[in-house]
Every structure is written in structure tokens, then in C-alpha cells.
């Protein structure tokens, strides 16, 4: 059995993501250049950057786990603990702050019963205050996973949460 085949059978990633990683490291002149995309794809599949994820990525690229952690810790969008199925990111940068971003964040905290980087007991929602999501013209704004919601009011929070709870039910969730 080859070293690469052994890695495939022991991988924490799906076969499809493992194949994607193999293509990524071939794409760049330096294998290390594939690190950030690999971290993002891994987080999408696993939910966070576990010790096993960090170890396997380090092995695939040929760098130390410390190197992977040092890069990953720089980016606020990368997580080392599990998030909820729906990760709510509330922007409180200047544009959003001036148009009610903190009120939106406070309302989410109240409605979900969690604080910054918290996860609801059922694992459905996590919440975090973020610096900027690039929607300044439509402030205040949030991002839930990869979906943007803008021009929000505190009153719109209930509907947003209800919509995601319904999405969870549609997919056979708890």
C-alpha cells in the first residue's frame, strides 16, 4: 500500500474532499500555498478545525501542526471548536454599528440565550460578533453560514431565526 493510499483510508475527510485536496496541492508551486483553502474546505465539511483535521492537513502539505495552527489562528473565520448548524455572524463594524449592529447582536443573544462564540444547547445555532462582512452599504447586516441578510432591524431577528428553524425541519433536523 502506498503512503498516499494509506492516507486515503485513514482520512478524516470524505473521499471527495480528499481528492480535492490532492488536486489543490498539485495546483500550487508550493504545497503550503494550498493551506488556507484546505482549512476552509475542511471546516465546511467537518464543522471546525479539530486536532485530527490539523494533523491530517499538516501531513498532506508536509508542514508541522504548529505551522497549520499558526496560520489558522490568524483568520477569524476559522474555528477550533464546533459551531452550530447555522452560524450567525453579526457585523458590528462602523457602518453596521452606526445603524444598529449592536442592537441586532444583543437581540440575537437574548433570543438564542447565548453570547459571543456560544452555541445553543441543541447545536442548531452559534453566534459571533464579527468585524466586517463587507455589506456596509446595506448595514446592519449579518451572515448565516454563507447567506447574507441586510438592512436588518431588531424586529427582523425573530423571522430570521424562524426561517432557519424551518430549514432545519425541512432537512429532517431535530
Image (cartoon, rainbow, N blue to C red):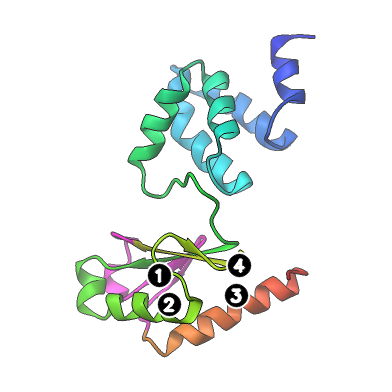
**What is the number of the mark on residue 142?**
1
Question: Of marks 3 and 2, which one's residue comes earlier in the chain?
Answer: 2
Q: Residue furthest bottom?
A: 155
Q: How would you rate the neighbour count of disc 4 (Cα within 10 Å): few for under 14, some for 14-19, many for 20 or more?
A: some
Neighbor class of circle 3 (other Cα within 10 Å; few <14, some 14-19, many 20+) is: some
The reply to whether callout 4 and callout 3 are in contact (CB within 8 Å) is: yes
Q: CA distance from mark 1 to mark 2?
A: 11 Å
- Mark 2 lies on residue: 108
| Tag 3 residue | 164
Q: Which residue is mark 4?
A: 124
Can you say whether 16 is above or below 76 in the image?
Answer: above
Q: Secondary structure at mark 2?
A: helix
Cα–Cα gap, marks 1 and 3: 14 Å
User: Residue at (44%, 28%) from the top-left corner?
Assistant: 68
**Are discs 1 and 2 less than 8 Å apart at CB?**
yes
- The N terminus lies in which quarter of the figure? top right
> Does the segment drawn in magenta span residue 155?
no
Q: Earlier in the sequence, mark 1 or mark 3?
A: 1
| Residue 51 place in picture, x, y as percent | 55, 33
Proximity of marks 3 and 2: CB atoms separated by less than 8 Å: no
In this view, 63 is above or below 21: above
- Cβ atoms at labels 4 and 1 below 8 Å apart: no
- The residue drawn where x is 37% and y is 39% is 73
Amino acid at each position: 500500500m502506498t503512503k498516499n493510499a494509506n492516507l486515503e483510508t485513514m482520512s478524516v475527510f470524505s473521499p471527495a474532499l480528499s481528492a480535492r485536496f490532492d488536486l489543490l496541492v498539485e495546483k500550487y508551486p508550493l504545497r503550503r500555498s494550498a493551506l488556507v483553502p484546505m482549512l476552509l474546505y475542511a471546516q465546511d465539511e467537518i464543522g471546525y478545525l479539530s486536532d485530527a483535521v490539523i494533523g491530517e492537513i499538516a501531513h498532506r502539505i508536509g508542514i508541522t501542526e504548529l505551522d497549520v495552527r499558526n496560520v489558522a489562528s490568524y483568520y477569524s473565520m476559522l474555528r477550533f471548536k464546533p459551531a452550530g448548524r447555522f452560524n450567525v455572524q453579526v457585523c458590528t463594524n462602523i457602518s453596521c454599528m452606526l445603524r444598529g449592529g449592536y442592537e441586532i447582536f444583543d437581540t440575537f443573544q437574548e433570543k438564542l440565550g447565548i453570547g459571543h462564540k456560544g452555541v445553543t444547547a441543541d447545536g442548531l445555532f452559534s453566534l459571533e460578533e464579527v468585524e466586517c462582512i463587507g455589506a456596509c452599504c446595506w448595514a446592519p447586516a449579518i451572515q448565516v453560514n454563507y447567506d447574507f441578510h441586510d438592512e436588518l432591524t431588531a424586529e427582523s431577528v425573530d423571522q430570521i431565526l424562524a426561517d432557519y428553524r424551518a430549514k432545519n425541519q425541512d432537512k429532517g433536523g431535530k
